[in-house]
Image (cartoon, rainbow, N blue to C red):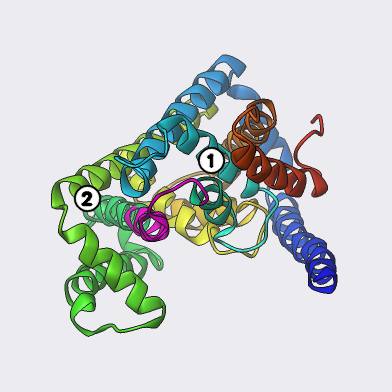
Amino acid sequence: MGEPKLTRSKKFPIRWALKFSVSAGVLGVILWWLPTDQVWDAIQRIPFWLWVVVFGLFLAGHVLAAVKWWLLTAAGSNIALWTALRAHFAGLAANLCLPGVAGGDVIRAGMIFRGSDSKTRVALGSLADRLLDTLALLFLTGLGAVMIFGTRAFASGPLPLVAAFVLLTVVACTLAAALLPRFARGGLLGKVADTIGEFRQRPGRLIACLVLSTSVQAGFVGLNIALAHASGLVLPNAAWFFAWPLAKLIAIVPISLAGLGVREATLAALLSPLGADAARVVAVGLIWQAVLFATGLLGGLMLLLTTNRSSAQRGTDTAIADRLSSQGLAGRER
């Protein structure tokens, strides 16, 4: 039993180092290509009080996201909403240091898994939560594409192809959700089909969660628009609704450190043809990354300060806290 654990502990820093290298490399290229004085000027234009407001509203958005996840996985069970809230923010902390796209999802599900009276529902609900968030992002970027369709800026470059791909993806996902339960058997597709089939029996809750997810993600787009205006970057709101959700989906791919560098490069590539100054786009992206990292650190601190629970829950929390601490996130001042 000891050898597999040792193997995982050796592999983990390598994966984390690779992700850090990708983020550092992409950021290095961006800052080498763009005039860094313009990036720094745009950052300085954003007042600290606005960053604090954005940070507070971002936290509020994730409280709503935690409620949504609780509704899908544990509502009506013996798992309290407070437990789900702690687990959700612990997952945000884990997203900063654990390899793989599902790192944070695994952590938050693990924190309520042991105490749940329906472990299948926790697993299926977590999968449904991720699917709803993805669908919400696709819907918003498709809506943004429709809103800016036909403009001269939109017609230039590869944006029409990107928009067509997004809209086709939305249609494909809708058809897949309708047909998958009839044909998928076993494996990952079977699990997805089971999730869709279970929540079809509770359409009201599923629709409410989808609306909640879409509202939260739209609110995050609005926060980025506020930061952009403060930096001197003024674009049609539709441009942000087109580009920001798409950049977030690309940044989720586990090749970088919490999307750092990849998100900024994607935003600049998508918004530049629409008249945006790339240096200011990158500046807004870096300020937003500061919000994400601060939230992750707060999640780790929240986990460490609220471990006075039952012995079973305490053992789970301690194991998670130790794992985060061993990677240099928990218990380190930054």
Quarter of the figure with the N terminus: bottom right
Q: Nearer the viewer, mark 2 or mark 1?
A: 1
Q: Where is residue 20? Give x, y as percent.
A: 76, 57
| Nearest the eye: 327 or 139 | 327
Q: Earlier in the sequence, mark 2 or mark 1?
A: 1
Q: At 32% across and 44% down in the image, what residue appears?
A: 213
Query: Relative to 311, is 54 above or below?
Result: above
Q: Where is residue 36? Give x, y as percent.
A: 72, 41
Label 1: element kind: helix
Q: Amino acid at mark 2?
A: Leu
Residue under pointer 1: 87
What crowding class fits label 2: few (fewer than 14 Cα within 10 Å), some (14-19), or many (20 or more)? many
State the residue lying farthest toward the top. 49
Q: Which mark is residue 233?
A: none
| Quadrant of res 139 | bottom left
The residues colored magenta run 114-132
Q: Which mark is residue 206?
A: 2
- 27 drawn magenta: no
Query: Relative to 90, is 260 above or below?
Result: below
Label 2: element kind: helix
Q: Amino acid at mark 1?
A: Ala
Instruction: Evaluate if marks 2 and 1 touch, with contact meaning CB atoms under 8 Å apart.
Output: no
Could one spot residue 289 in this view of the protein? no
Left or right, residue 13 beside residue 139: right
Q: At 22% across and 50% down in the image, what residue appears?
A: 206
Q: Where is residue 160? Give x, y as percent.
A: 31, 66
Q: Where is residue 45? Give x, y as percent.
A: 60, 23
The prevailing secondary structure element of the residues shown in magenta is helix
Q: At 75% across and 38% down in the image, what residue appears?
A: 330
**Could you give the CA–CA distance between mark 2 and mark 1, rounded to whole angstroms?**
21 Å
- 129 drawn magenta: yes
State the residue lying farthest toward the front. 311
